[in-house]
Amino acid sequence: MIEITSEILKKVYPSRPEQAKKYDFGLALIIGGGEFYSGSPALAGLAAFRAGADMVRIFAPKRAADIISSFSPNLAAYPLEGKWLEKKHLSTLIFMIQSAKEVSHGNCALLIGGGMGRSKLTQEAIFELIKRLDLPIVVDADAIYALAKDPQAFKGKNLVFTPHSFEFFVLTGKEVLGKEDSEKMEIVREEAARLGNIILLKGRTDFISDGREVAINRTGTPYLTTGGCGDTLAGICAALIARGLSPFLAAQAAAFINGRAGELASQEYGEGLLATDLISAIPKVLK
């Protein structure tokens, strides 16, 4: 069992070389949003930037993309025609993701799921898209539901699942809510081994496993129940994988950073904590 501490930051953030250039530290791609939810991809993108990504590109249905672009000049959002992701968008997305891999020299990772919705057409499109891609992918929120229909189809595909307890149940059929930490550890390890991918089970204590080892993160605060604080975690994770970290190490570091930033933000805001406050605290964690 691995107990995650601040020492992990030394592995993740070594000194930058003087000759560093754009994309050396990653291009994080985000697919998310829909007719109702637009904040999720924006929060993930801003968190990815604060975690050190050189660039973030967001792909979202037009209404969401337009709103995301207005949040911050740092965010580049490509609008997809229509209200939701559908299969008609797949060829465009695959082309743009391949182009992103080339321009970043492979320093690239994808986050998918936040705010996309669970309509049949969108869920089928998510399933098909992930099946056809070849890069590390953080699978969050609605994308977990899409892959839960047949998670074995993605065994060994370099995915990081980031479920909370109910999403974990949807993905695996295993209940962890209310169980002792020792039981959660073993269940998460067994399911990560069965699925052949990384699982980051979010909670007051986070459990991360690659199917062999289990890491535990205890940073965090009860105030992280605020909407958007899971999106920030997923964004940080995608940014770290894009930097070249192994998905298992990236998931551990993301859990630590997100939890610690939440702790710092809650000291100032308490009950009024917002996900944007957590994002602002990320640089303090990395100092």
Image (cartoon, helix red, strand yellow):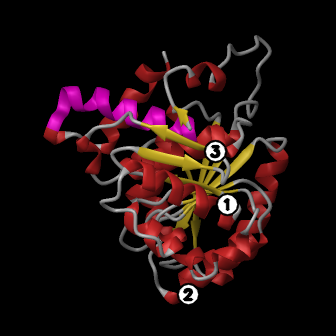
Q: Residue at x 58, y 82 (%)?
A: 149
Percent across and percent down for residue 106 are 82, 44
Q: Residue at x 49, y 61 (%)?
A: 65
Amino acid type, residue under disc 3 in the picture: Glu
Q: Which residues are magenta?
A: 252-270
Q: Residue at x 74, y 37 (%)?
A: 244
Query: Residue beneath label 3, please?
Result: 213
Q: Residue at x 23, y 32 (%)?
A: 266
| Dot 3 crowding, Cα within 10 Å, few <14, some 14–19, many 20+ | some
Q: CA distance from mark 1 to mark 2?
A: 30 Å
Amino acid type, residue under disc 2 in the picture: Leu
Magenta region, main secondary structure: helix
Q: Is residue 80 visible?
A: yes
Name which quarter of the figure residue 78 lies in. bottom right
Disc 1 or 2, which lies upstream in sequence?
2
Q: Is residue 63 visible?
A: no
Q: Is residue 254 magenta?
A: yes
Amino acid type, residue under disc 1 in the picture: Ala
SS of the residue at dot 3? loop
Q: CA distance from mark 3 to mark 1?
A: 10 Å
Q: Is residue 223 left or right of residue 80?
A: left
Query: Residue beneath label 2, please?
Result: 121
Q: Which mark is residue 193?
A: 1
